[in-house]
Image: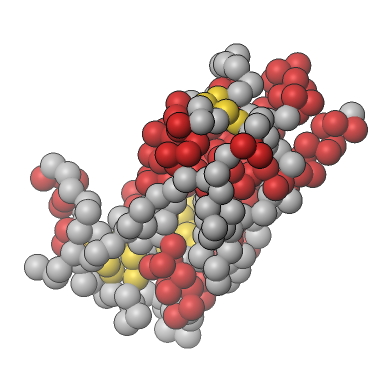
Amino acid sequence: MSAVEKDFLERLAAVNTWKRGDERAPHKPLLLLKVLSRIQRGEARLVRFSDIEYDLRRLLEEFGPSRKSYHPEFPFWHLQSDGLWEVPGNELLELKKSGKSPSPRALRDSEAEGGLPERYDGLLRKRPALIADAARRILEVHFPGSMHEDILEATGLDLGATEPAAARAQVRDPAFRAQVLMAYSNRCAVCGFYSIMDGRSYGIEAAHVKWHSHAGPSTVANGLGLCILHHKAFDRGVLGLSDDDCVLVSARFSGNEEAERHFLPLAGRELLGPQPGQPRPAPEFKRWHRKNCFRGPERGVA
């Protein structure tokens, strides 16, 4: 491994995301993934803020916590502090008094451009496999596995034949799945789905309430047995949990009759399980999920 590659991967692992309590802030990771896709497609190193602003805002809306407003200008400016980004001529931009970042209008009006430093951009263009490796590392650190494919599709990244799950399996506690599925009797905790194939449970997964990527422990108290459909819906914020272990359904969810049949009746339903003697999801993890994942407001109980 060259010194430049080692330096790039170390900086990638040390990206400093905005913190306030345990809120998640995926701004910089999403910008990096979008830029990796640009390099993969052979696009120019520097991109105008005005040309990437809309795409980055859409990524934040879809894969970030639900917010009243979204700020693509934050990662475009603040990623410079991690040594992975540069905005040539940034000293000419008018800075906000609070936060020391230019307004979106200032970035647009000045036609500000940003991109990876030339040494990293050139490295990635010479070694396309490193793009996929970098993307997997970002996904693994900042997002649950159920969201990886959706993020890749939204950013336009192609990781080839190697699935993110291959890397994911190396860092997950193998006992977590077995313990959670046993606690929930191999049934989905929200809909009761249960199936067996060749003597083994099929279609049920162990979900983290507080994401593993955000220091959520691999314990039954931070786990739920969920079918594949409701696992993804839980991670994407369609579903949540109340303090008294009732299912929340986002009022922002809608679909055809078949889709609604799988979600609307769940609103207000008490969790199914776990077995007696097994811990229910801990309050602090449910609060984290409602704050960082659930896309409220909740739908009223029919």
Task: Name the residue located 28 percent from the left edge and 62 percent from the top edge.
Answer: 296
In the depicted structure, whether residue 184 falls above or below residue 238 = below
Q: Quadrant of residue 297?
A: bottom left
Q: Quadrant of residue 281?
A: bottom left
Would you say 27 lies left or right of 293 here?
Answer: right
Task: Name the residue located 42 percent from the left edge and 39 percent from the top edge.
Answer: 105
- Residue 299 placement (x, y as % from top left): 18, 64
Q: Is residue 62 or residue 245 the one in the foreground?
A: 62
Q: Is residue 169 or residue 66 the one in the foreground?
A: 66
- Residue 156 placement (x, y as % from top left): 48, 26
- Please say which color scheme the image uses: secondary structure
Count of labels in the image: 0
Would you say 14 lies left or right of 206 here?
Answer: right
In the depicted structure, whether residue 71 falls above or below residue 270 = above
Quadrant for the N terminus in the image: top right
Q: Quadrant of residue 244?
A: bottom left
Would you say 178 lies left or right of 65 here?
Answer: right
Quadrant for the C terminus in the image: bottom left
Q: Is residue 250 visible?
A: yes
Q: Residue furthest top?
A: 42
Q: Is residue 127 visible?
A: no
Task: Name the residue located 77 percent from the left edge and 39 percent from the top edge.
Answer: 9
- Residue 252 placement (x, y as % from top left): 22, 54
- Residue 169 placement (x, y as % from top left): 64, 47
